[in-house]
Amino acid sequence: MRPRSRTLTEQELAIMMVVWRLGTATVRNVYEELLKERKIAYTSVMTIMKIMTDKKHLRRRLVDRAHVYEATRPKNLIMKELVGDFLNRMFNGSAEPLMLYLVHNRYISKKELDEIVRAIKERT
């Protein structure tokens, strides 16, 4: 059997966003937060969180007869990995074509563009 990928699926990422926001969470906490955005079964959340624990994205501990989960890695590290993987697969590792695409297709507002220019000037 092939080992599970450590890459986060769309559902796993949604769960991670909740766990990062809450710091620690039970399956019930995550389920209730996800229900605010879309319909999902409690058992699906429980199964996905078990898989995420197996993949080492989450760790759990028993607190007063409930499993409490927390992220094993910070959000900024996961974001860096996901963006880097995307850049490598779609743009040969270069951010320039992505930025040009976003600017030309108006995915970046004038305000956001000004902030990016400011950040670039601070970096140089």
Image (cartoon, rainbow, N blue to C red):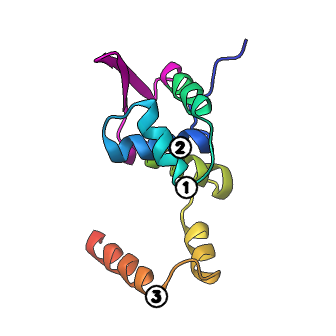
Q: Residue 105: percent from the left, percent from the top?
A: 65, 80
Q: Amino acid at mark 1?
A: Glu
The residue drawn where x is 37% and y is 43% is 20
Q: Are marks 3 and 1 in contact (CB under 8 Å)?
A: no
The residue drawn where x is 56% and y is 60% is 94
Q: Indicate which disc, 3 or 1, sits on the residue closer to the N terminus.
A: 1
Q: Which residue is mark 3?
A: 110
Q: Which residue is mark 2?
A: 13
Viewer-side residue, 13 vs 106? 13
The residue drawn where x is 63% and y is 22% is 4
Q: Are marks 2 and 3 in contact (CB under 8 Å)?
A: no
Q: Tell me the quarter of the picture where residue 6 sits.
A: top right
Q: Which mark is residue 37?
A: 1
Q: Secondary structure at mark 2?
A: helix
CA–CA distance between discs 1 and 2?
14 Å
Count residues near mark 1 (Cα–Cα under 10 Å), then give few for <14, some for 14-19, many for 20+. few
As for residue 62 lying within the magenta part, the answer is: yes
The residue drawn where x is 56% and y is 23% is 51
Q: Residue 74: percent from the left, percent from the top?
A: 35, 40
Viewer-side residue, 119 vs 15? 15
Q: Amino acid at mark 2?
A: Leu
